[in-house]
Image (cartoon, helix red, strand yellow):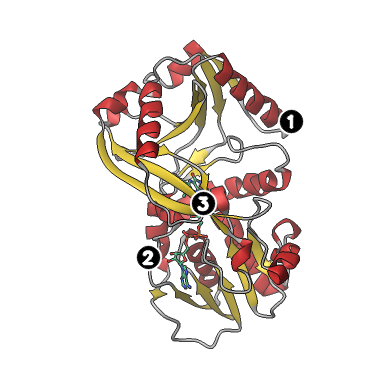
Amino acid sequence: MARVRVMGAGIIGLAVADELLRRGHQVEVVDPSPGSGASYAAAGMLSPVGELWYGEEALHALGHEAAELWPDYAARLGVALQRGSVLAGADAGDMAQIDRRLKLAGSHHEQAVALERAELLEREPGLGRVLGGAWLPDDHSVDPRAVVAALRNRVRVADTAQTIEPEVTVWATGTQLPEPYSALVRGVRGEILRLRLPTADLPRHTVRAWVHGEQVYVVPRAGGEVVVGATQEEHDAPPVVSAEAVWRLLDTARRLLPALDRAIFVEATARDRPGTADNLPLVGPTHEPGVLLAAGHFRHGVLLAPLTARLIAEQIETGGVEPAVDPRRMAARVKQGAGR
Ligand SMILES: Cc1cc2nc3c(=O)[nH]c(=O)nc-3n(C[C@H](O)[C@H](O)[C@H](O)COP(=O)(O)OP(=O)(O)OC[C@H]3O[C@@H](n4cnc5c(N)ncnc54)[C@H](O)[C@@H]3O)c2cc1C
């Protein structure tokens, strides 16, 4: 049994703490503002296929592995898992984007089925003027706030460090790593909206779309919430919601899903995604004995949470390291403080 302090109670710190507690370790979690970071904003898409991109094979492999953990993980936490996603496009240029994704999925042996307009509308009758799309049966979604709440029921979080003399400290503080690691993660702002629709008007699945070149996603929740996201912007200022982002997201989303005109506007949120230089998270040991990182999960922290929790537990128990996410790959940046 190890004595472990976890700094940070976003989805990553909480998932790590829960996994360690389950394995019988002594754990203290410290966060003055639990669940208030990027995890509060996240849409909750578990999208190893929809997020596939060129040159991101290692990230895809991790995402694929994590996605396979989610059905059991969600069941254990008592959180609903919404299954499958569609891609949709409004014009020929948008369809070229979808074609590219279909080819990428095929080359990574992932399931993705092209849909004619009629087939797409059969799956998602509420869509507006779309030309066609694709069905991604293995891209699911969860409500990250429900996941955080379920984890917080299992893990006690303190404002300040107090109860244990830790043998291991895990920094799971999202964009806010301590020195000398702070330069390994940078904030990438995301703005996202939450609205409410009558359940009959909700899309049946997550819809990721290109609408005349504008990208948008719409994630439905059983209770009537619909999440519309998201912007992505490199910046140095605190994350605030810009009027332009609200306007652009709503304008694109209502062209995709006209019923959104009847929605109740609930919330616009901005948070920083914790980005790294290679878009891969930092999970595992540092050059300091007893100091581990579980940070830098960028666009995929919800998806990767159960996998990161397992990797940290295995590191503590066996010393095992997953090379693709080993924080020591960034050693030069730690010394030079040149992560940005
Ligand atoms: C708009 C948006 C949409 C997203 N959508 C998705 C999605 O669909 N799917 C997906 O997988 N991911 C998504 N993400 C990414 C995901 O939100 C992040 O990767 C994930 O939330 C990171 O979790 P975290 O626990 O590392 O960080 P955070 O949630 O930011 O938590 C960090 C915690 O550390 C605490 N903290 C900071 N400093 C200290 C300190 N010194 N001591 C103690 N505690 C401290 C903070 O209070 C905070 O609670 C999205 C992100 C954004 C912004």
Q: Which residue is mark 3?
A: 235
The mark lying in front, picked from 3 and 1, is 3
Give residue 107's mark: 1
Give residue 153's mark. Answer: 2
Q: Secondary structure at mark 2?
A: helix
Residue 253 x/y as whole percent: 39, 28
Report helix, strand or loop for mark 3: loop
For this view, does 329 lie left or right of residue 116? right
Q: Earlier in the sequence, mark 2 or mark 3?
A: 2
Q: Amino acid at mark 3?
A: His
- Between the C-alphas of marks 1 and 2, the distance is 41 Å
For residue 78, say whether it is visible: no
> Quick one: label 3 or label 1, which is nearer the N terminus?
1
Looking at the rendered structure, the kind of residue marked 2 is: Asn
The Cα–Cα distance between marks 3 and 1, rounded to whole angstroms, is 34 Å
Up/down of 253 relative to 117, above or below: below
For the residue pair 163 and 295, the one nearer the viewer reads as 295
* Quarter of image, res 55: top right
Identity, as a three-letter code, of the amino acid under mark 1: Ser
Provide the secondary structure element on which disc 1 rests.
Answer: helix
